[in-house]
Amino acid sequence: MSLAAAVAGGATLAAYLNAKFHISKDVSSLLNVRRSEREYARAVSQKQGNIWFFFKETAARYPDMVCIWTRERSYTYREIMAFANQYGHFFLSKGVKKGDLVAFYLQNRAEFIFAWIGLWSIGCAPAAINYNLSGDALLHCLKISGAKLVLVDDDDECRARIDERKSSIEGDLGMELITVDPTFTTTVLSRFPTDVPENGRLALNMDGEYPAILLYTSGTTGMPKGCAFTMSRLYTTVLIRSGGMVADKPGPNGDRWYSCMPLYHGTSAIAMMNCVVSGRGIGLGKRFSVRQFWNDIRDSQSTFFVYVGEAARYLLAAPPSPDDRNHRVRCMYGNGLRPDVWDKFRERFGIAEVGEFFNSTEGIFALFNYNTGPFTSGSVGHHGLIMRLLLHNVFIPVAIDPNTGDVLRDPKTGFVVRAPYETGGEIIVNVPNQEAFQGYWKNEDATSKKFLRNVFRKGDIYYRSGDALRRQSDGRWYFLDRLGDTFRWKSENVATAEVAEVLGQYPGILEANVYGVTVPHHEGRAGCAALQINPEAKANFNFQELARFARSRLPKYAVPVFLRIVESSTHIHNHKQNKVPLRDEGVDPDKIGTKVEEGKEDQFYWLPPGDPSYKKFGRGDWEVLQSGKARL
């Protein structure tokens, strides 16, 4: 064999192995992470581990670049720096000291960014409160922040929610309320200088474990928990993103990212600040609106947009328009894009790339899928051979006890039962100690519950993600369910997300929200699907064909026994499905409308024993179940 032939053969083999095992992708990712860690360590050694210094360099590099677009006006880096400095001086004048948090009760607006950067400049950070919260939940989030100052949006509804508890906020919590309105900006903030407070001295030596922003969990099953997105995590995230994780370009002729997802939510906040800090332009929409979304995209000339949860499904449900592809967007970035929407959305709107990540506020278990073709469509992450080998004993699926909902332990050894990756289970993460997770803010009890001990051997410790996923042999990761959503029926575990994905493929169904309901004289929970049906399909919707469709694609035990036809989706503030009130009401006629007020008139259907079609379900049918005369 000639040398040339040997070289050609070797190159062909190398290309084949790389294509099969994605070696170059893994190597590139690992090098990017290592480089980011080195650069952050160098910044820390220079006492500049505060991401504010990174922003300061970017603002000096692109002073006249338009960085922030809003419907009202746009702002250059020079203007952002000036406003941020004024906020820094303002905070100092109010007695805010290095290491303090200031609470933000703000909608999406440029001032959120200005004030955030201003806090960094004096060694502080914001606590981002969900502006939809009211009453006890609002007071709870403010209290655990420890803030003494609250920036309040001038939106009428926001101010009304604050006013309802104003006496408690100012009296019991001792907090000062500052409404960010035009009067504040022109008569108060404008009096402060535009130079850097104390020449940047207060920004030095910022602890890497200090919050870059305090975020909160969604609070669907209890009060929200505070969780710091630490300065070290944000700094390295910015470096990783800039290092090629996403193919965007900085500078005046670079990319612009649009988000109307709330800035109190980590997905939007971190994506937007990533861009501002690293020289990418952003566009801010005040709130999500199907009608306004594409107008904002076009007017801001955005090339990326951020999504969360079911936002893409809402956009897809809108009637087709000649302007569907009239935009410059080439990539959508976020989390929660369901497989039944993924390709339909890309094809209709002409989006070439999807950056779907899987993560949580806590940040211990993270995956990313930069999808540009059919191979990884619908998956929440992908690992090549090298990453699979490195993480084999780090990201581990474990079986769940069907009776307790806790991890399943071997009765002989007492150790946790590991599940095959292809089957999946709750993902637990191997950590060296409890300090690997910074913990919930001022909540040691909740923090301790995130850990498992004596898992595979005595003395070991693992972090509980609370999410069930599976990984195929080729490295593609797929979301199964949130722990607590999966239910037991006919001695089998039913993953709600997988059932919803199948139902979502049936013509006329806009969205399926699947959950388990208790039924008299039956063990476990029967499946129920809250279906939002396209108005055009409602009149002729074929329930018998839906039953046949579900039975042909799902195991018998996973086919929903009940359907609830809803007029609107039941979502929490971040556009993610909320099963809790639907599950609490179940199918008991006396409970309908007690938790979901807008659902009082919802129609119910069921699959009677032996019947080929879903039939209307009413009080008489419920009484039959109560009497024990029907077995599902």
Image (tube, rainbow, N blue to C red):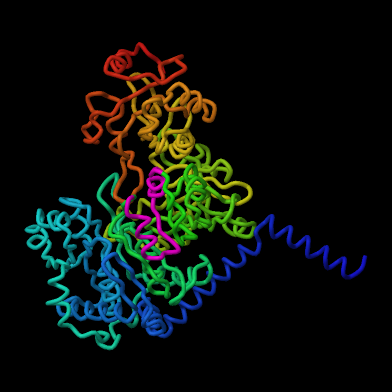
Residue at the spot x=38%, y=28% of the render?
525
Residue 497 higher or lower than 140, as above or below: above
Q: Position of residue 272 (x, y in %)?
A: 37, 66
Q: Quadrant of residue 85?
A: bottom left
Residue 557 higher or lower than 39, as above or below: above
Whether residue 464 is visible to the viewer of this picture, yes or no, is: no
Residue at the spot x=41%, y=53% of the render?
451
Number of marks:
0
User: Which of 30/15 is in front?
Assistant: 15
The reply to whether the magenta stretch includes residue 411 is no
Residue 108 higher or lower than 462, as above or below: below
Relative to residue 546, is residue 576 drawn left or right? left
Range shown magenta:
291-319
User: Which of 614/514 is in front?
Assistant: 614
Residue 59 higher or lower than 440, as above or below: below
Q: Residue furthest bottom?
A: 199
Whether residue 487 is visible to the viewer of this picture, yes or no, is: yes
The reply to whether the magenta stretch includes residue 312 is yes
Q: Name the quadrant of the N terminus.
A: bottom right
Residue at the spot x=13%, y=77% of the render?
188
User: Which of 526/172 is in front?
Assistant: 526
Q: Quadrant of residue 632?
A: top left
Q: Position of residue 573 (x, y in %)?
A: 29, 50
Q: Residue furthest top?
A: 629
Relative to residue 586, is residue 165 drawn left or right? left
